[in-house]
Image (tube, helix red, strand yellow):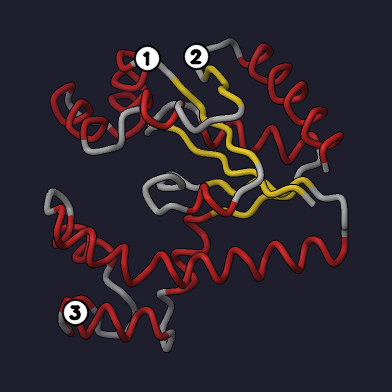
């Protein structure tokens, strides 16, 4: 098995790349999905969030009010760090379990772990290979404006809130340019997958 961390900046095309890897035959583990699962009702991570951030982070039905929590931590580095310190360890355990399950069925699996905060959460240290999807800032801004209906200023703020792509690229084994044509991106993903499959 080969565990491959896939990351990039916001609106660089990471989701498209992860989908193409699955089409090539890779197995996908999505950090966003795991993060939602670990804070489900009755899970220890949710209890810890309530302890740290208060009961008003819960909806009347006892589930996490993600919007309210988002507002509480967005733009506040200290609060965000506290939240990540709760959630990331649970996500790491879930990711290991998911990977073991996949390997049980397919010992030579190429497992793509799609995580926006792969490097920030130090999860890249558990991976065999790292792929970073890049795009120039103007492309990111244009995509964010179209996709999330943000103003230019809001889009730039979102991008600035993330670790710079230039930093992420430093730890990458492979860099995929998310501004290529769909056909070129597909070819590039296939090329990288073939190499990874060979290593697995």
Q: Which residue is mark 1?
A: 136
- Report helix, strand or loop for mark 2: loop
Q: Position of residue 135 (x, y in %)?
A: 43, 18
Taking the view exactly as shown, the residue that stands out farthest to the bottom is 42
Q: Position of residue 114 (x, y in %)?
A: 55, 46
- Report helix, strand or loop for mark 3: helix
Q: Nearer the viewer, mark 3 or mark 2?
A: 3
Q: Is there CB contact under 8 Å for labels 3 and 2? A: no
Q: Residues within 10 Å of mark 1 (few under 14, many from 20)?
A: few
Which quarter of the picture shows residue 175? top right
Q: Residues within 10 Å of mark 3 (few under 14, many from 20)?
A: some
Task: Check residue 169 in the rendering and tell me which mark sits there, or answer none.
Answer: none
Report the residue at 30% width, 36% height from top: 163
Report the residue at 59% width, 10% height from top: 181
Give left or right: position of 164 versus 154.
right
Q: Quadrant of the C terminus?
A: top right
Residue 40, relative to residue 196: is it above or below? below
Report the residue at 42% width, 32% height from top: 168
Nearer to me, 141 or 99: 99
The residues tagged by marks 3 and 2 sit, at their Cα atoms, a distance apart of 41 Å
Q: Residues within 10 Å of mark 2 (few under 14, many from 20)?
A: some
Task: Check residue 52 in the rendering and tell me which mark sits there, or answer none.
Answer: 3
Q: Position of residue 83 (x, y in %)?
A: 26, 66
Q: Earlier in the sequence, mark 1 or mark 2?
A: 1
Residue 139, relative to residue 160: is it above or below? above
Nearer to me, 56 or 85: 85
Q: Which residue is mark 2?
A: 179
Q: Is there CB contact under 8 Å for labels 1 and 2? A: yes
Give left or right: position of 137 versus 5.
left
Nearer to me, 112 or 3: 3
Q: Earlier in the sequence, mark 1 or mark 3?
A: 3
Which quarter of the picture shows residue 150? top left
């Amino acid at each position: 098995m080969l565990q491959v961390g896939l990351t990039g900046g916001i609106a660089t095309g990471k989701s498209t790349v992860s989908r193409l890897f699955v089409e090539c035959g890779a197995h996908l583990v999505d950090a966003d999905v795991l993060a939602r699962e670990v804070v489900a009702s009755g899970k220890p991570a949710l209890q810890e969030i309530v302890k740290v951030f208060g009961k008003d982070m819960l909806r009347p039905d006892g589930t996490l009010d993600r919007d309210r929590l988002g507002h509480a931590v967005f733009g506040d580095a200290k609060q965000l760090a506290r939240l990540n310190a709760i959630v990331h360890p649970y996500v790491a355990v879930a990711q290991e379990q998911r990977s073991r399950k996949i390997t049980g069925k397919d010992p030579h699996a190429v497992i793509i772990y799609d995580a926006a905060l792969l490097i920030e959460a130090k999860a890249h240290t558990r991976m065999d290979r790292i792929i970073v999807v890049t795009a120039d800032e103007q492309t990111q801004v244009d995509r964010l404006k179209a996709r999330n209906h943000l103003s230019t200023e809001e889009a730039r703020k979102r991008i600035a809130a993330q670790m710079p792509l230039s930093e992420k690229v430093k730890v990458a084994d492979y860099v995929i340019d998310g501004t290529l044509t769909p056909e070129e991106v597909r070819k590039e993903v296939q090329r990288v997958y073939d190499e990874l499959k060979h290593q697995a």
